[in-house]
Image (spheres, rainbow, N blue to C red):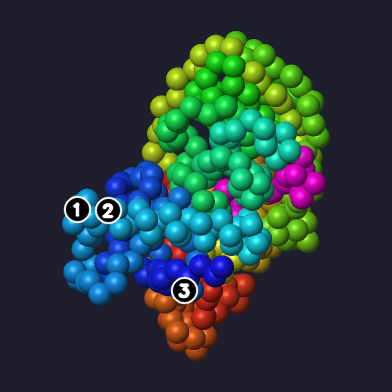
Amino acid sequence: MRCRLPPVRLRRGVITDEWLELRGERSLLSGPPASRFEQIRWGRWGNAFLMQQTPLCRQRGQRNGGKSLPNSRSKRNHAEEHIARCAGLYAVISRLQMFDPPSPHPLDHDWRYDEATARRLADRLTGMQPVLCLGAPSVARLLEQRGVDVTLVDRQPLQGVARHLVQSVERFTADRRYRSALVDPPWYPRQLQEWSNAAARAVGNGGAILVSVWPWDTRPSARAELDDAMSIFGRWAVVRRSVDSLQYEPPQFELVAHRHAGEPDLSRSPLVGELLHLTVTGTPPPPFVLSPGVRWRRFTADCYQLAVREGGDTKLDIAFVPGADGWHWPYVSARAPDIGRIDVWSSEGEVAGCGAGDALAAILRRALASPDARAFDEAMAQAPSLLTWGIPRPPYKRWIEWQHQQ
């Protein structure tokens, strides 16, 4: 039997605290709210590709000048039925492995498990549903393909998982009780504690948490930091060490760093990790008080990602970053010198200073909306240096704009 669904066309819009409103088409979004610090401006997609648990619904033959639909029961029922059909289509797409995630970006600390590691982790979690994945979207996709009840929490909006809460883990509050969790945090002490504590609050007493941690030779302080973390975990969980060895694939920005490296220790990651098993027996500490951080405007065109630091002057001055090899950043460590002077950063390891992030974001927005390569180059005339970067030219299969706090 062939299932026919109405086309879902995605136009430009913004995720707010409550909904995604699509400009110029009458549409609904049903799903979890995004943090007020995280907005998404959607660019052009193809005809029917859905994302997260919040697929977009288009009602035929009705327009209201870009305003959201009235809150009527009949229209909500129609929307819910359409969402269910769309979610089924999304599951089919995921099952056929047609989803192609964006290239990893260094701001996301995005090192991905190799295929064998992802499958072993999925095997461990398959019988422990519902499962919560904090990070680890590749494992969440595998679990979803197996029919496991899984929820992914990840601020990167393009992950190809039906139940995807698009938000920072630090701002996550459990929406229900989970039986198990997989935690793949950035390999720094504070993030390890924050992410593990969030998982513990979600699974409760008796719940199981798998946590990836760094090896002892990651940095000079790595062993002492890990020992401190084990001591803290022991206050509210039974800790089992070295449950499995984890292997990661080198992201493109790390391969670029290898080619341009000046200091090898800061240009390479271990690409191996240790898996912990925590059985929750007590109450973890309350969430950390979050302080305002740097805000980044993010653009994704096909698989290429570009981040622009918000703020700055109105005068655009794109320049090399001290310590970089031309436009290429030779480091992968947060301890790298002059890392705070990066204003523009790509998933291909390209970096630049800018001085006017908001102005550059406006230029990129116009360029990405261009119909073809020639119009793109004309729109980028005020930032000609970036034409030498690896930014793909339109038309695109997808492009979006979103925002986060670092």
107 left or right, relative to 406: right
Relative to 346, does residue 106 appear above or below in the rendering?
above
Residue 76: assigned label = 2
Q: Is residue 101 left or right of residue 264?
A: left
- For marks 1 and 3, the one nearer the N-term is 3
| Mark 1 and mark 3: Cα distance apart in space | 27 Å
Residue shown at 51% from the left, 57% from the top? 88
Residue 205 in the magenta stretch? The answer is no
Please give the residue where the numbered disc 1 appears in the rendered image.
72
Crowding near the residue tagged with mark 3, few <14, some 14–19, many ≥20 C-alpha atoms within 10 Å? few
Q: Would you say residue 118 sits in the magenta stretch? A: yes
Helix, strand or loop at mark 1: loop
Please say whether residue 227 is visible from this viewpoint: yes
Q: Which residue is denoted by mark 3 in the rendering?
A: 47
* Callout 2: SS: helix
Secondary structure under tag 3 reads loop
- Nearest the camera: 288 or 12? 12
Query: Left or right of 69: which side holds 203?
Result: right
**Sequence-wise first label, 2 or 3:** 3
Query: In the figure, residue 10 lies in which quadrant?
Result: bottom left
From the viewer's side, name the closer residue of 9 and 213: 9
* Count of marks, rendered view: 3
Marks 1 and 2, how far apart in space?
Answer: 6 Å
Magenta region, residue range? 105-120
Q: Position of residue 186 (x, y in %)?
A: 62, 38
Give residue 134's position: percent from left, percent from top.
56, 38
- The image shows residue 335 at horizontal and vertical percentages of 64, 41
Kind of residue sitting beneath label 2? Arg
Circle 1/circle 2 CB separation < 8 Å: yes
Residue farthest to the bottom? 374
